[in-house]
Amino acid sequence: MAKKKEELRRRRKRNRDIEFLNDSDDLIVEMISRMKNAADEDRQLLSAGQPATKKLSMFKDVSALLRRADLKSALIENGMLSAITEWLSPLPGHTLPNLIIRDSMLTSLSEFQSLSPEVLQESGIGKALMYLYKHPRETRENKDKAGRLINEWLRPIFNLKSDYRTLTKEERKQLDYEHLPKRRNIDNEDYNHRDINRELDGEGKGVLRPGDPGWINRARVPQPSNKDYIVRPKWRVRENPNGDDDDDEGNDDRTDESQSLNRRRRKPGSSGFGATSRIEGHIRNLTNSARRSHAKAARAVPMSIEGRNMSL
C-alpha cells in the first residue's frame, strides 16, 4: 500500500512538473514576442522623431523573468538570447539603447551558464556585445562586462580551456609539461633510452672520440636537437639600481665577474675603478682649465685716481 502511494505521489509530481514547464514555455515565448515587437516599435518611433519608450514600459516584467534561476535553461532553449540581442542592438542613427536596459541585460547575460557556440551564433549576441564594447559613448563598467562575456564565450569556440592571465606559476609550468610534443625517434626506438653515463665513460661501441684511431678533426654538419625546452629563463634584471639586493638569484656570480673586471682595469697605484680612464682625465683637465680662467678673470687691477704710474 505504501509503495502504491509513493508511486502515485511521484506520478503526480511528474505531471505537475510537466505542466509547470509547459506553462513556463508559453510564458517565455509570449515574453520574447513582446520584446521583439517593443524593439521594432522603438525603432519606428525614433525614426519618426518621437521618444522610444516601449522597451522601458515592459522593462520590469522582463527583468523579473530573467532573474528566475529555475528558468535559465528554458529561456535559452526558447530563444531569449535573440530577444536580448534586439534590445541591445543600436537604434537608428547609431544611437545606443537606454542605459538602464543595457546595464540590466549585460548583468543578466553574465548569469547564464554553459552557452554552446551554436546558440551564440544563432542569436547574434556576440555582434551586439562587440558593438557596445567598441562604442565610444558606452560606460567603462558596461565595456568591462561586455569584454568579460566576449572572452568567456570565445573560449569554447576556439577550444581554450582556461584564462592564462589567472594562472599561477606552478599551473603554467604544469601546462607546459602537459603540452609537450612526443619525442621523435631519430635513429631507432632505443635512441631515447640511451645511457648517457655509459657513453661518456667510453663504454659505448662504435662511437669515435678525440684521440681515438680514425678520428677526423674537422667541422661536421650539426644534427637537429630533439630536446624540449621547458625551463623558463631566470630574471636577470636588478630591481635595486645600487645592486645590493641579496635576494636576486645569480648575484654572487655577477659580483665575482664585476670584481675580476675591476682588478683587470685597475692599475697599480690607482685609487679605484676607472681612476685613470680617459673620460675622467678629460673631465679633470676641463675642470682645471675652468678654474684657471676664472682665477685670471677675477684678479684685481690696481688703478690710481690721481693718475700715478700712468704713461703719458
Image (cartoon, grey):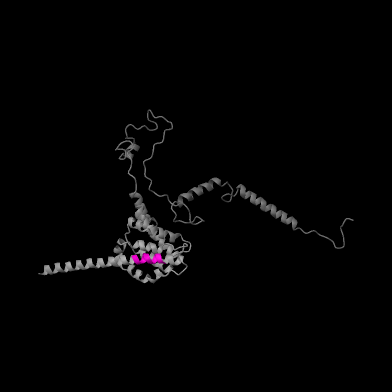
- Which residue does the image show at 35% across and 57% down from the upper left? 122
Q: What number of labels is visible? A: 0
Q: Nearer the viewer, residue 26 or 118?
A: 26
**The furthest residue to the top:** 214
Residue 190, position in %: x, y? 29, 38
Q: Is residue 107 visible?
A: no
Which quarter shows the C terminus? bottom right
Q: Is residue 18 left or right of residue 205?
A: left
In this view of the protein, can residue 8 be seen by the observer?
A: yes
Residue shown at the point (75%, 56%) measured from the top left: 297
Residue ID at (41%, 60%): 128
Residues in magenta, as a range: 33-41
Q: Residue at x 31, y 66 (%)?
A: 30
Q: Is residue 268 above or below residue 84?
A: above
Q: Main secondary structure of the magenta part?
A: helix
Q: What is the x, y in percent for residue 13?
A: 19, 68
The image quarter in which residue 9 lies: bottom left
Give the quarter of the figure containing the N terminus. bottom left
